Amino acid sequence: MVIQTHTKLEEIMHARKSVRKYKEGVVIPREKLEYLLEQATSAPSSSNLQPWRFLVIDNPEAKKDLRAIANNQEQVETSSAIIAVLGDMTMYNNAEQIYNANFEHGYMAREIADHMIKSSVALYGGLPEDVLKNIVTFDAGLISMQIMLLAKDMGYDTVPMGGFDKVKFAEKFNLPQHEIPILLIAIGEAAAQAYGSSRLPLKQVVRFV
């Protein structure tokens, strides 16, 4: 069976490439970056606790300092901005705010909201640190992909970077103890076309049972 479809989303997905060469001096207005991140927060998360936090680094001196602790990757300094995706290890403290808002918007009954508040605090508040870290890292991955696709739709290119010293990053940017750095996303206008990249055949990666 041949499925003939070619949606805008598919076009964006295939057009998105990991760009490492950026036009220097291109400024993305902070209002655009805020809009991008606001739209990206439609991503799902564990119990809707939305553990993602963002540190947007668009100051040239700060980017230069970051490059030194990010394996000297050129795009850290030449891109318009770096979106650092962080994870809040105490995201369950926002359960009351989140589920009260769900009730107020008519998304759920009061008793369900109260149950979710109580169960979320009890469950996540009692988890070991390594389990919590896995959860917030997983959720950070979900929103990071949305950020990159939305950026492409807005006319910008990106590249995700996990190669940086997370301890030094936390120290440099004075992160609170309950926030952990997970990923850096460079965003800007491409100065050179990214390489194409092949994918394994579907039959090699998919099984039906």
Image (cartoon, rainbow, N blue to C red):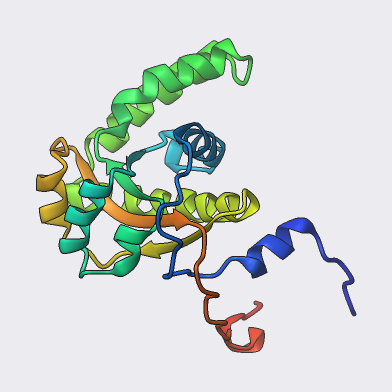
Which one is in front, 28 or 39?
A: 28
Q: Position of residue 46 (x, y in %)?
A: 43, 42
Q: Tell me, yes or no, if residue 69 can be seen here.
A: no
Q: Tell me, yes or no, if residue 168 can be seen here.
A: yes
Does residue 122 appear to the left or right of 197 in the view shown?
left
Which one is in front, 180 or 113?
A: 180
Q: Residue at x 44, y 25 (%)?
A: 116
Q: Residue at x 60, y 14 (%)?
A: 105
Q: Position of residue 14 (x, y in %)?
A: 66, 69
Task: State the image quarter where residue 199 is shown.
Answer: bottom right
Does residue 64 appear to the left or right of 1 in the view shown?
left
Task: State the image quarter where residue 88 is shown.
Answer: top left
Q: Is residue 110 above or below residue 32?
A: above
Q: Quadrant of the C terminus?
A: bottom right
Q: Quadrant of the N terminus?
A: bottom right
Q: Residue at x 65, y 68 (%)?
A: 15
Q: Is residue 116 above or below residue 170?
A: above
Q: Position of residue 29 (x, y in %)?
A: 48, 37
Does residue 51 appear to the left or right of 156 in the view shown?
left
Residue positioned most to the front: 25
Disc count in the image? 0
Q: Position of residue 192 (x, y in %)?
A: 51, 73
Q: Residue at x 23, y 43 (%)?
A: 127
